[in-house]
Amino acid sequence: MTCHSSDSTESIENERRSQSETQVADTEQSRIATAMRDLKNTAGWYWGSLTANEAKEILQDTSEGTFLVRDSSQRDYLFTISAMTSAGPTNLRIEYKDGKFKLDSVVLVKPKLKQFDSVVHLVEHYVQLSRTSCKGRTNQIAPSNGTVQLLLTTPVYTATPSLQHLCRIAINKTTRRVQELPLPNRLKDYLTDYTYNV
């Protein structure tokens, strides 16, 4: 029969807790690294360390729904979506919590907002939602309660995307069964490296 002192038991528990915290931190770093990789693969609508004023200047003469994603200037957030609305350029922070990304919002709405594994998934969702709602509206009058509808329809690129990337987006819009296409494996790998349609 072995006896452990309370110091020994406490030491073991602290070691387990430390290992668990390290695993969580590694998982968080891995998720953020994947999100960054996906953002860099967007071919240019992720602008990196752009300020709010610079984003406003870029969006100033664009149409409603034009957007870009940039690093957030607030320490508590990683990213911000800057978009042109009917009231002018606006910024919407992206919150990261428990391995998921979602739009920052007022406390009452927050629990209802959809969460995503990556920033690109989040943007893709709201772009599809915006494009669908734009098709359904004809000369819609702005809401009378003073709110502004946020639309994300057209990304602003840092540079013109390559034809390869634009083709990849077109294929991704058409099918999610890339592996079944009669294409060389190298091309399938390229298509599956960025599976989004934005």
Image (cartoon, rainbow, N blue to C red):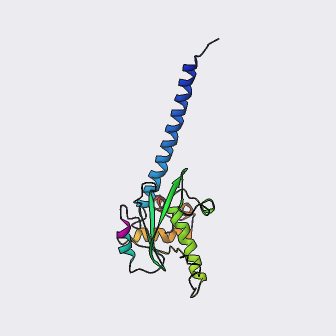
Q: Is residue 6 visible?
A: yes
Residue at 56% x, 80% y is 134
Quadrant in the picture for residue 51: bottom left
Quadrant in the picture for residue 167: bottom left
Residue at 46% x, 52% y is 32
Q: Is residue 186 visible?
A: no
In the displayed structure image, the side of residue 4 where residue 155 appears, left or right: left
Q: Mostly what secondary structure, the magenta segment?
A: loop
Reply above or below: 83 against 178: below
Instruction: Locate the N terminus by quadrant.
Output: top right
Q: Give the residue at the far right of this rendering.
A: 1
Residue 47 magenta-drawn? yes
The x, y position of residue 96, in whole percent, is 51, 55
Reply above or below: 160 against 31: below
Which region shows up in magenta?
43-54
The x, y position of residue 136, in whole percent, is 61, 82
Q: Nearer the viewer, residue 6 or 162?
A: 6
Reply above or below: 112 against 84: above
The x, y position of residue 10, in whole percent, is 56, 24
Residue at 56% x, 88% y is 139
Q: Give the residue at the far top of this rendering.
A: 1
Q: Give the residue at the far front of this rendering.
A: 145
The x, y position of residue 143, in whole percent, is 58, 81
In the displayed structure image, the side of residue 37 where residue 128 appears, left or right: right
Count the labels in the image.
0
Q: Nearer the viewer, residue 66 or 76?
A: 76
Residue 158 magenta-drawn? no
Q: Give the residue at the far bottom of this rendering.
A: 139
Residue at 58% x, 16% y is 5
Q: Nearer the viewer, residue 13 or 123?
A: 13
